[in-house]
Amino acid sequence: MADLTTIETPFYLYDLDLLEETVSSAMKEAGSRGFFVHYAIKANNNPVVAGIIRDRGLGADCVSGNEVLKSIELGFPRKGIFFAGVGKTDREIQLALDEGILLNCESVEELRVIEEIAESAGRTARLALRVNPSVEAFTHHYIATGMDENKFGISTAHLQDALDICHGSDFLDFVGLHFHIGSQITSLEPYKRLCERVNQIWKDFDISGYGGSLLNMGGGLGIDYDDPEGNPIPDFASFFTVFSQTLKLPGSISIHFELGRSLTGQCGKIVTRVLYTKQGVGKKFVITDAGMTELMRPSLYQAVHKIKNISSSGNPQTYDIVGPVCESSDVFARDATLPATARGDLLQIFSCGAYAESMTLNFNLREKPSPVYLSEGKLLTAGNYQAVNSTTNL
Ligand code: LLP
């Protein structure tokens, strides 16, 4: 087994074998049902991680012009790149038009701007309309997107207007509908309800009659943060079965998904060193060299990531595990149980393959750690990953 103790901490550690297995499972289950999968590159744009996903033939789901450019640079085919987002700038819309990228339009107001820009560029914008279906995702309210109170998508009250604008324009090529109700969704019920809503919307608004032939159901499938080792690969078969069983649409419609966390979440960990164990008043702190700057999910969403001390087998003790950043919210875990922990011990924070490296902060002028990869039992840094895998474009 590779030796983690010699590498400068903190670092992201990616298990590329697990990533390959996870992506293969998703692609097998989607492919056997005739579905297409795109990778939500916001989850992790690390070029090795995204490169493996690109090599498996996924498209890319982007939410900024820079994500579109990154996806193109990484070699995702342009026709598989979708571009969503409630606040696209004129420059980003122009980029999508120039590169032939499908836009997921999120409001009637945006639709008019897209039309204007397309007209003056003498181009036709290929677009899907993102609809807010008013379906509860039962997840943390910061990552729910499909309710009326959320800023995302076009409400059904405005959908007819949007369809009419597309229909009456020479510069808008309407291809279908986009939905995404939220992230870290751990029950399949919301997806069932979403499918039922989509069936109804497709029929009520005669989407096929307007030329709709593409349906994008978004992402959001959750991962097991409590037991990442017991459940390293999400149950893609059950997930996709909900859609193949519940959607009732003409067979000619292509059905797409945008998965992020479920593909990469469990393949990544943060390895961090204990700087101090500090006796507080009525509690003990374990202070690590990683902080919210490397993993902001606990500070932002009260997320709980499993943490293990891989250096100690001492008696269990209770600690608050905190980072070094100048914020009281820089806490990974409160009242957590770890074996007796000392300065110099290495901790692993699990489930950091999604929304960790891509959400790093430069706050306190902290440096972004270099990732390390684990492949077939070998530890590789970015430099020697390139040496052993010349097909991946770093
Ligand atoms: N499609 C759209 C339009 C999205 O906005 C997102 C995520 C996805 C797909 C992918 O969702 P996933 O399959 O990864 O759940 N930073 C938060 C998550 C924010 C998700 C934003 N949108 C977290 O750390 O939990």
Image (spheres, helix red, strand yellow):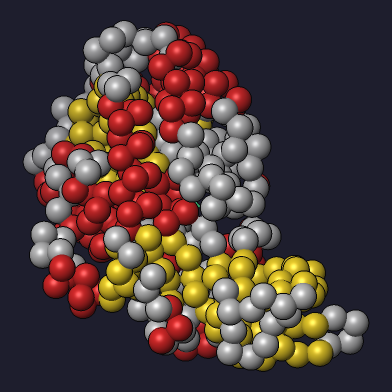
Given residues 84 and 189, the one toward you in this image is 189
| Residue that appears at 61% across and 32% down | 187
Q: Relative to 164, is 1 above or below?
A: below
- State which quarter of the image contains the N terminus: bottom left
Residue ranking furthest to the right? 282
- Which x, y percent locates residue 28? 30, 31
| Residue that appears at 41% across and 36% down | 218
| Residue that appears at 44% across and 61% down | 268
Is 189 left or right of 383, judged from the image as shown?
right
- State which quarter of the image contains the C terminus: bottom left
Q: Relative to 154, is 48 above or below?
A: below
Q: Quarter of the image holding residue 389?
A: bottom left
Given residues 37 and 127, the one toward you in this image is 37
Given residues 73 and 22, the one toward you in this image is 22
- Which x, y percent locates residue 344? 58, 89
- Which x, y percent locates residue 24? 30, 40
Determine if residue 156 is in view: no
Is 289 left or right of 104, judged from the image as shown?
right
Tally the numbered discs: 0
- Which x, y percent locates residue 127? 26, 33
Determine if residue 332 is in view: yes
| Residue that appears at 47% across and 88% down | 365
